[in-house]
Amino acid sequence: MTAHRILLVDDDEDILAIIKGNLELDGYLVFTATHGKEAIRIFESEAVDLIILDLMLPDIDGIQVCRVTRTHSHVPIIMLTAKDSVSDKVLGLESGADDYLVKPFDYLELAARIKAQLRRSGVYVSQGDVLDVGTLTLIPERREVAVDGEPVSLTKKEFDILALLFKNAGKVLDRETIKAEIWPGQKLYKWSRALDVHVQRLRAKLEKNPETPQYIQTIPGVGYMLNNDPSQIPSPER
Amino acid sequence: MTAHRILLVDDDEDILAIIKGNLELDGYLVFTATHGKEAIRIFESEAVDLIILDLMLPDIDGIQVCRVTRTHSHVPIIMLTAKDSVSDKVLGLESGADDYLVKPFDYLELAARIKAQLRRSGVYVSQGDVLDVGTLTLIPERREVAVDGEPVSLTKKEFDILALLFKNAGKVLDRETIKAEIWPGQKLYKWSRALDVHVQRLRAKLEKNPETPQYIQTIPGVGYMLNNDPSQIPSPER
DNA sequence: ATAACAGCGTAAACAGGCTGTAAATTGATG
DNA sequence: CATCAATTTACAGCCTGTTTACGCTGTTAT
């Protein structure tokens, strides 16, 4: 039962502080941003469960932020609009928002919509699951990983990559797929070796003998696979 | 191991045929439509897993089709747009498409996006599909091959060729088709013997008597075929 | 404010083996 | 026997993944 992660975006620092305080009282983990770019940065670096987004932002339009996030993820988004303008509502919903709220609004109403969206997005049901592969354990909601019961501290990128491999354990994931999932805004160019480096750092932390990987197997010319086969065939290919 | 069902909508019959052929080679079950109404009819009568939708259609706009389907289900939709127009992109994503592709596009790119969408939509969890031909076993998602239960290590090209033959077991594939699938970028000379060499290496690894192939049969003047007929075993012909 | 540090992507060097080509050989066909 | 297609062998290039080091950025500590 760990806290849900909420990204709160509004240009008004006072409102930001008030809502953030209330959300934290309700047990949420809150990230805040006052600018659109800042919001996108946080969205890309933190695994948030829900976004509360003001329509009016200093730099980038809230709708633009909405579109960017929607391109690669289905995180529920609640739009905040300054006035009761129909065009704003329509615009907000069309751009991919799941719900909208007209300012000024009651916090209780926001709290209700948050719960509704979280329940609808299925974050609730994904609670309590622990993934195991051999002596590896991964707890998605806590973003924790343990090998042989010993917790290992991973960076965000490392965890994201490992989690992706975990979710597809036993299946080969090709490089392009992995890169598309881990770097949504195609911040990487095609021939980047960033993925390889991260995998190498992962192996250094997880594998007993990093030179003969037991878990993360490389499939030459294709990609990587997390081996969940008990028979432990060391070289399925090559 | 039931094939995924794809609805392909484009007004250009030639493009339709080409993409359909490629999709079927990849093991998909393809429905095609050239008009919007036709697409909606098929969508309502067939349980499709994914829709590939051209933006420009003779009767109804692709976006309209998109909206209609979206009101009934959450089938992933990949939009095809004629030119790299920003407004088209935005329009496509706003109307509820999950991804878009700008024509002309490489088939490999489309294939990658299809897999990504299917995986994201959760349909791709057909964990248990294992292909068998005689004593040969092929697990696509693990890229593993076993003969008589003994795992055999194949290189990427070898596996790709064998997988293609597997997916079309019992059917003759002519050289040009195989080469088009395995070497998409026209990287090979038309008179290259690379395919023959790879087939030879495959036989060396798979067949008990490589000189009398039991599995990979050559059809002189045409191409190759993976024999799935148990009755036709190495019989001294003539 | 400056320094130290962690996280991350890039660049370059390196090794190994995959892979296509060329050429010789066999086989099929008429 | 002539001819064309397919098989087989050998080999060099280069592609691919690994590894190390470095620079950049943002954050925390001094």
Image (spheres, coloured by chain):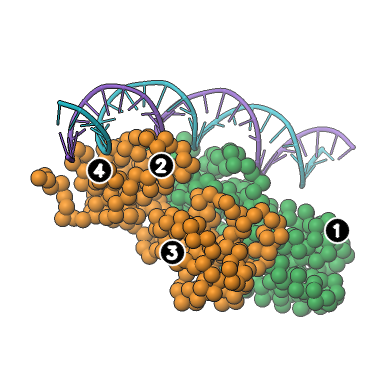
Chain colours: A green, B orange, C purple, D cyan
Neighbour class for label 1 at 10 Å: few (<14), some, many (≥20)?
Answer: few
Q: Which secondary structure, mark 1?
A: loop
Please tell me if label 1 and label 2 are on a single chain: no
Res. B196 in view:
yes
The residue labelled by disc 1 is A58
Disc 2 from disc 3: Cα separation: 27 Å
The nearer-to-camera label among 1 and 3 is 3
Disc 1 from disc 2: Cα separation: 50 Å
The residue labelled by disc 4 is B220
Q: Which chain carries label 4?
A: B
Q: Do the residues labelled 4 and 1 touch (CB within 8 Å)?
A: no
Residue A164 on image: x %, y %: 54, 54
The residue labelled by disc 2 is B156
The nearer-to-camera label among 3 and 4 is 4
Residue A69 on image: x %, y %: 68, 59
The residue labelled by disc 3 is B30
Query: Quick one: label 4 or label 2, which is nearer the N terminus?
Result: 2
Q: Which chain carries label 1?
A: A
Q: Depth check: give the residue in front, B100 or A183.
A: B100
